[in-house]
Image (cartoon, coloured by chain):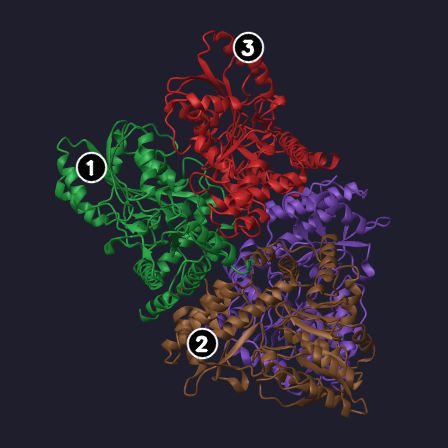
Chain colours: A red, B purple, C brown, D green
Amino acid sequence: MTHATGRHFLQIPGPTNVPDQVLRAMAAPVIDHRGPEFARMALELLQDVRAVFGTAEPVVIFPSSGTGAWEAALVNTLSPGDRVLAFETGHFATLWRDIATGLGLEVDFVPGDWRHGADPDTVRERLAADGARAIKAVCVVHNETSTGVTSRIAEIRRAMDEAGHPALLLVDTISSLGSIDYRHDEWGVDVTVAGSQKGLMLPPGLGFNAVSAKALRAAETAALPRSYFDWRPVLAANKAGFFPYTPATNLLYGLREALRMLREEGLPKVYARHARHAAATRAAVRGWGLEVLCADEREHSGSLTAVLVPEGHDADKVRALILDRFDMSLGTGLGRLAGRVFRIGHLGHFNDLTLAGTLAGVQMGLALAGVRVDPNGINAALDHLQSC
Amino acid sequence: MTHATGRHFLQIPGPTNVPDQVLRAMAAPVIDHRGPEFARMALELLQDVRAVFGTAEPVVIFPSSGTGAWEAALVNTLSPGDRVLAFETGHFATLWRDIATGLGLEVDFVPGDWRHGADPDTVRERLAADGARAIKAVCVVHNETSTGVTSRIAEIRRAMDEAGHPALLLVDTISSLGSIDYRHDEWGVDVTVAGSQKGLMLPPGLGFNAVSAKALRAAETAALPRSYFDWRPVLAANKAGFFPYTPATNLLYGLREALRMLREEGLPKVYARHARHAAATRAAVRGWGLEVLCADEREHSGSLTAVLVPEGHDADKVRALILDRFDMSLGTGLGRLAGRVFRIGHLGHFNDLTLAGTLAGVQMGLALAGVRVDPNGINAALDHLQSC
Amino acid sequence: MTHATGRHFLQIPGPTNVPDQVLRAMAAPVIDHRGPEFARMALELLQDVRAVFGTAEPVVIFPSSGTGAWEAALVNTLSPGDRVLAFETGHFATLWRDIATGLGLEVDFVPGDWRHGADPDTVRERLAADGARAIKAVCVVHNETSTGVTSRIAEIRRAMDEAGHPALLLVDTISSLGSIDYRHDEWGVDVTVAGSQKGLMLPPGLGFNAVSAKALRAAETAALPRSYFDWRPVLAANKAGFFPYTPATNLLYGLREALRMLREEGLPKVYARHARHAAATRAAVRGWGLEVLCADEREHSGSLTAVLVPEGHDADKVRALILDRFDMSLGTGLGRLAGRVFRIGHLGHFNDLTLAGTLAGVQMGLALAGVRVDPNGINAALDHLQSC
Amino acid sequence: MTHATGRHFLQIPGPTNVPDQVLRAMAAPVIDHRGPEFARMALELLQDVRAVFGTAEPVVIFPSSGTGAWEAALVNTLSPGDRVLAFETGHFATLWRDIATGLGLEVDFVPGDWRHGADPDTVRERLAADGARAIKAVCVVHNETSTGVTSRIAEIRRAMDEAGHPALLLVDTISSLGSIDYRHDEWGVDVTVAGSQKGLMLPPGLGFNAVSAKALRAAETAALPRSYFDWRPVLAANKAGFFPYTPATNLLYGLREALRMLREEGLPKVYARHARHAAATRAAVRGWGLEVLCADEREHSGSLTAVLVPEGHDADKVRALILDRFDMSLGTGLGRLAGRVFRIGHLGHFNDLTLAGTLAGVQMGLALAGVRVDPNGINAALDHLQSC
């Protein structure tokens, strides 16, 4: 028995629910990407997009997925055989490692339990031990989408500074940008990697690199082969409001509208909203008597919450039941977490009542799937939403 | 402090949330309303729309609000000074009465307490007492939008038959059509009045009259002046797929899509869904310790639930708080119910999790407004949704 | 053989091509028509719409076709048996006459040849001869959509003033508003009738009445029965930004965008653009060796051009061929002009190259239909467009 | 003096005018790219897209520009130092050469005059002379967007076969796919490169590679580094209807609609339509007394026409005037053709009257820019459109 009427609840941790006004903005006619109207839009957009990264430096936009933006961060700054320090914070950190390895980089991959972020102390130790300065870059996933754990980038920066090590800092913000407080300049990040389909509230199709002056200097000598993802022709063409190849015009229309919405709400409020919804979600999970995957109170994600299902239950069966019965999509357990967790996305264009509906659906779905849950879970979340 | 991001919860009892696909269908370019493509569409639509009324007879579509369709039902069938039997079931029944009176009809308006539907026994008695057959029409609001009470049309029809009285039966289904089981032909209704903006899931702008053969015969002699709302030129032009004046083309595009969606779900499922959501809503209301306005178990509306707020509280203050704090619109108390009730719309393009979000918002809003409610109300609703 | 790809050319004299941005504006979600956001929009809109009428007085908006707005103009100002002076300028003037007659008014209908506008001298004579002041209103169609003839309202006003006659002046601007210079206040019009689907660049579904203070006074004593089209409850509710019945919300969104576009272009430029396109069209028609229906150089319409086809040809066959072969809709000959003319709409959201494509299609269609035309017609139009 | 109302004429040779229905299809909500609904859509789409390539073999879809798809064709099939035969047919062939060179390939670049396609005889000779089979691939741009010249792929294939050479055949169809007859399988092409924004009538943002079995075998040993553009993980995930990274969901919605439209019209009719519009355009150009850039009658492009402006005139000034005065975008002269040609795009969602408007705009713009043109040019085009 299905009740698939009304609006689908897309509560995976991205792509997120695209606001109607963004979809409408994207439905405008394509314009000449070499004409004056396009140039005006692009110049404005390339300036305005910087705020959400917390940077005054250039942001390169690619027609690509976030994966492409990962690759761009690496090929523009590194050379074959370069050593990179990375952290096994979860599935996506592992995928990025695989890309780096595939491109011919040597990755020191610090093992992890998928319940913690990258450890600043380890960063300090590893870099301090690298007397030869063989490590050229530190790669960190800010918000690990597979686990709902947010690494502490400011502390990692501090650790790098304390080690006095010149490695570049490359940070993946694919599921944090526009949702969780982030400061490219203040934290001394060299390349920030992002995508369009999460906190930016757009459909997938755009990849981003915010690029520090130091990263730009690295690009001059980096020897990994690159063509499509080469920053230099993009930055050169961007000066006049153009792109070296046909840009994804309609996604840029959407980006303009999404940035306007974020500005209107104000980034501090956007971050506070996400944190508040995340706290309410954890209140529900704990109210149900279940466990949140993230094991460090300092590292709870504002974007998503991964929930451990008790032994003897298959998280994917719960998800399938919820999809079938309540028309809600939740995130699956990825990699080693398959079947053990489901993930609730609470990011992007989102509000209290949609969160309440989401949590109600999870609660009912768990119960119907035979997972013993305390039905006061939902009220723990509502109490949180009411009280702050 | 406002959290106005994400999608607005439009939970008034109409206009309802228009499905995205209907809005997109309406965004198609206008076509020549005298051309062959239009005629094909109109002929198909004028046939397909009948199913939702439960009729094989013609349905007249006006560019108008539902109010216009009320007027159309009267001016096409009645003459100045004609006597009409109507029932004070609530605010909208009273408005319709006012229109009838304004048009020069004599209305026998049976008083009511705004918590019950039109009483079939009273119909039988009044008609039986009308030996002179002075009463030309019985006017009933099927679902009184101001109270959430659904009158029992089949029983009223039976009462009319038992009285052996030839009066026409005119029924307002503005907030029931496409939401609550309705059968124009089977119940022997002569004119069914409807609008686009409720169960038909369209924006406002179309009024409907389903018209029986008996009503058409009445139209031949009815003497109330009529022009815009005259059925005859419309029915004549409709034969070839045209209209006597420019139709609201884009709303007709939307109607085509909405009818397709209703067909796809199946009307019995549509009605069952509404009834189930209404029952879950009442479970919440009672769980909170509050009272549903509708006083007869046989007459609970599937479209909306009017909730009495306890003495000492202003329902409109609760509504304002909920709008401000949770970005949800609820229906106000109308007429004599002002300040005493708020109305929860649960009709149209709607599903379990949107209902859960809606009820969560009401529960939090009541609590924040200082109305003492049992927080298990939400769980009473979830229990209902889970169990059937 | 059909080539129906690309965008349809909708070159009937209305409904016109709705701009993409208006369609997108209309695709926004419906909001609570009793809530504060709606009220803000409505108050702004009810103020802004006045400019296009050239009035500082209120404009009443109905969910209706233009036909409904005709009826509204009559029923709000007149009483049964009142005498009205009207002019047979074409098909629509005749329809309006029929409505007036149907409502119980006495219409003095000055005969016409469907090639001229209402004659100011006749107005003066008829009114001067009406010593008893029996004529309560003069009804004029500003731009007769069936003929492409524009009556000279300013001169008619002067004629009325010269006759010293107190009759109301009711003017239909359905196909001129927003296309042809019009001044409700300056010309002393009492009721201006309009619709959404022509110069206002919206889909059909809204009717308008701009109302003078004198008309409002007339409404106090006018005795024609009225309910849906009664100005008074609308004007009363409008004061707070509301409507007495559910308004056509999404068309109001579109109206807001359309008014913004007209303001951005500037009304004088809008009128000049239409006049220029009309002149280019006439240049083409004459270049082809054909005759424009409008017989008075002072009365050529800026919105549309009706073209006489030579004896022995059926204008509707030409239209059908053009629709089939070039996917362009042209206006048919109405009433007594059936088969003798086709009408080219050049109003609304329109530009030089769309006009050029339109005229090219007409030229090719005429040739293919066997009508002998000089192929330099198109160049006569291009010459005009190039030179001014 | 600007007349920028109505619809912009986007007559560059891509991006093309996206049909309204495609834009509306793209405005549907994003869905879970790991869910069953997505998989159903993707499996269908990955099958259906093959027809437009004329292949039964797999088509790989990237979130990228066409440039990315160029890179993908190279990195999946070739190894550093591999020799490639390519032809200087124009600006885009030169750019593709640059990418190949940048990736470490050795390109034999046969010089050209930018007025002819790749010469099949040269292919035969070069390959015959390559006794060592050092040439691993032949790269040809099917339709050179900078010149409006279409290379004869079938003849090139024959030449390769006659030379008995095993090189791969890589073909860029970015501005021909869905516009000009193309047969991946029949012509034995190994990789066909395409983008979304031309004949596929979509916004930019998708790159395509149709891949032969031979190309897939080459991919097993190709040693160029590749990650984002690696076919293998995409093809593996595609088997179940998924992608290895988040796909550009909404562009895929648009692709589904665009393919439906192409199927509905029928590819042979689509190609015939483009050829007919191209012929009409050449008739206009010659009628004006100007010269078409393409110098070989067998190689005229169906997608676009590059027009030489007479000595003493700057093509870009003509373009700027036309944009300013008639709101039409034309393609600029690229590379060595800068200032000497402008390009008229007549591809994608397009029809006779839009072409007529386009040519009228060019004719008027040339005249206003002081280029002496015979105004009968437009009529030469109309004659062609009328007669076939």
Q: What element carries label 3?
A: helix
Residue sitting farthest toward the right = B312
Q: How many marks?
A: 3
Can you tell which of label 2 and label 3 is closer to the viewer? 2
Q: Is there a contact, CB below 8 Å, between mark 2 and mark 3?
A: no
- For disc 1, the marked residue is D167
Residue shown at 37% from the left, 30% from the top: D227
Give how far across and how far down residue C112 sits, in percent.
61, 88
- For disc 2, the marked residue is C287
Pick the residue in front: A89 or B174.
A89
- The amino acid marked with disc number 3 is Ala
| Mark 3 crowdedness (10 Å alpha carbons): few <14, some 14-19, many ≥20 | some
Image mark 2: chain: C
Can you tell which of label 1 and label 2 is closer to the viewer? 2
| Mark 1 crowdedness (10 Å alpha carbons): few <14, some 14-19, many ≥20 | many
Give how far across and how far down residue C315 sits, in percent.
45, 81
Give how far across and how far down residue C35 sits, in percent.
74, 54
As measured in the structure, the alpha-carbon distance from the residue carrying label 1 to the one carrying label 2 is 60 Å
- The amino acid marked with disc number 2 is Gly
Residue shown at 43% from the left, 74% from the top: C377
- For disc 3, the marked residue is A163
- Say whether residue C11 is left or right of residue B183: left
Pick the residue in front: C109 or A24.
C109
